[in-house]
Amino acid sequence: MSQQAFWLFLKMDKRNLFVQMALQCAPVLAGIKVSNLLIIEERYWKGLCFLLRNSGLCARKLYCCRDKITLLLYRREELEQWLKTLQVEALLKELGYDSMELHRIFRKLEHRIGGHGNGEMPFPHELGLLLGYPAEDVRGFMGIGYKKCLYTGYWKVYEKAEEKIALFSEYDRAMDLALSMAYERQNILKLKEVFEVDSREKKPAV
């Protein structure tokens, strides 16, 4: 987040749904990430579902605790394609997922998250795969292969640090744009189009 975006954020109502979506979900709203987690008060659930109609985005409840819900905000087609990539699918199978159908993955993940919340099961690190984290970094974080962490950004990086640092910079740019739109009371569900225009404007002339 840039300093300018940070000062805008301080001026905004932190309980506002659009502000929280801008803060937590800018990369998926911008179309540069398959999903993001969104933690909001449960009273916003119906309003969120209404907002997402015809937006190209979906929301799935993963966990409820008191008056808060943890959701996965995602782009269905992109997420399904990502989960079927070779390394991601292989790791999911290693972790006990015998089906790559999204609804079946969700059901098992929700069961494991609930079990962790009750203190009965370990944390399901495969959640990182559903968030678009590369399989090599999820493996590294789980201690598979005992690789050294090279960088910490939106997740811990164990391979291809330069490539991922550049990606994190794009996520930051998406957040800056989303917070600016939220501050100006623009529809942040239009962030994908705004981000694409901003990218073209920043592209160096040939």
Image (cartoon, rainbow, N blue to C red):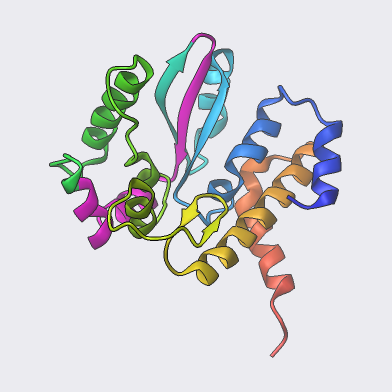
Q: Is residue 116 left or right of residue 5?
A: left
Left or right, 67 with reference to 16: left
Name the residue: 53% across, 54% down.
31
Which segment is the magenta one?
A: 66-92
Q: Decide which of 158, 12 is in the foreground and name it.
A: 158
In this rendering, position of residue 141 left or right of residue 109: right
Decide whether residue 30 is among the magenta residues.
Answer: no
Say how many tags the image has.
0
Please provide percent x and percent y for residue 95: 20, 42
The residue lying toward the viewer, choosing from 43 and 141, is 141
Quadrant housing the C terminus: bottom right
| Whole-percent x, y for residue 45 in the image | 52, 19
Q: Nearer the viewer, residue 164 or 151?
A: 151
* In the foreground, 44 or 161: 161
Asked whether 89 falls inside the magenta stretch, the response is yes
**Residue 158 point in image, percent of width and height:** 43, 61
Is residue 85 something that shows in the picture? no
Q: Residue at x 86, y 32 (%)?
A: 11
Q: Is residue 201 above or below residue 93?
A: below
Judged from this view, the residue extending furthest toward the top is 66
Identify which residue is drawn at 34% across, 59% down: 136
Residue at the spot x=68%, y=71% of the render? 200
